[in-house]
Amino acid sequence: MADRTIVCYGDSNTWGFNADFMSGAALNLRLAFDERWTTIMSNQLNSDSKNRYIVIPEGLNGRTVITDDDHDGCNGEYSGPGMNGRRYLMPCLHSHKPIDLVILGLGVNSLKTRLNLSPAEVANGLRTLIKDIKRSTAGVNDSTPPILLVAPPVCRENKLNIDWGFGGCDGRSIALIGEIKALAKAENVGLFDISQVAEVGEDGIHFDASNSRAIGLGMANAVKCILE
């Protein structure tokens, strides 16, 4: 049996933000550990594989692609240079190497209106992260780890997320999905389109437990195609 290390580098949807929390339909801000797609993917991979999969969730609420976000959210919790996905990427990769696969799931937070970025500019930032990963030598035997690029869900503007900065997120998220599909092809990396397996929940940005499960199961199949 061989170990396979997967780093899931993403935002609140990798962290497990509960879509039902803001509406009051759920008591907990974060999905239970067993409900998060990273856990479901891990369980699925390890239930029927000749390998042992070590899944490392590296999700952060508010994380952008390559932009500092100085908006003062909850007492600074979701603001400042720490939100810039590029700043922590390389330390993260070298902390967990050797890595067999990087699942890169960022982009939605970079669509916030205050950042004034087009979907094409967000995708270009993801191109920068992909190139960083390719240069990292954080894979097995100092190689380039394979990359699975995640296209975001189709978001839905509503009263629960408008204060977060997601005005117009419906059309902008759809445009970003198209840009990410083209990017994956151009950079010759894997692609997982969340919009094909799951829908956002009450807050228009995140997932409830059932959709999180669908993502985890779909992601497990995508990982097998790359690593087995």
Image (cartoon, rainbow, N blue to C red):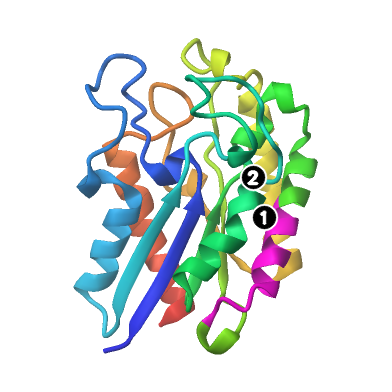
Q: Quadrant of residue 206?
A: top left
Amino acid found under the numbered disc labelled 1: Lys
Q: Quadrant of residue 199?
A: top left
Which residue is found at the position 57% from the left and 74% from the top? 146
Amino acid found under the numbered disc labelled 2: Ile
Image vertical order of residue 194 relative to residue 29, above or below: below
Residue at label 2?
177
For the magenta stretch, what is the residue range? 126-139
Residue 47 image point, x, y percent: 20, 71
| 30 relative to 148 in the view: left or right | left
Local SS, label 2: helix
Local SS, label 1: helix
Which residue is found at the position 36% from the left and 28% from the top? 19
Image vertical order of residue 20 relative to residue 84, above or below: above
Image vertical order of residue 179 relative to residue 202, above or below: below
Residue at mark 1 to residue at mark 2: CA–CA distance = 6 Å
Can residue 21 be seen here?
Answer: yes
Q: Quadrant of residue 166?
A: top right
Residue 116 image point, x, y percent: 78, 27
Q: Nearer the viewer, residue 196 or 17?
A: 17
Contact flag, marks 1 and 2 (Cβ < 8 Å):
yes
Which residue is found at the position 32% from the left and 60% from the top? 41
192 magenta-colored: no
Q: Main structural element of the magenta stretch: helix, strand or loop?
A: helix
Which residue is found at the position 61% from the left and 62% from the top? 90
Q: Residues within 10 Å of mark 1 (few under 14, many from 20)?
A: some
Q: Which mark is residue 181?
A: 1
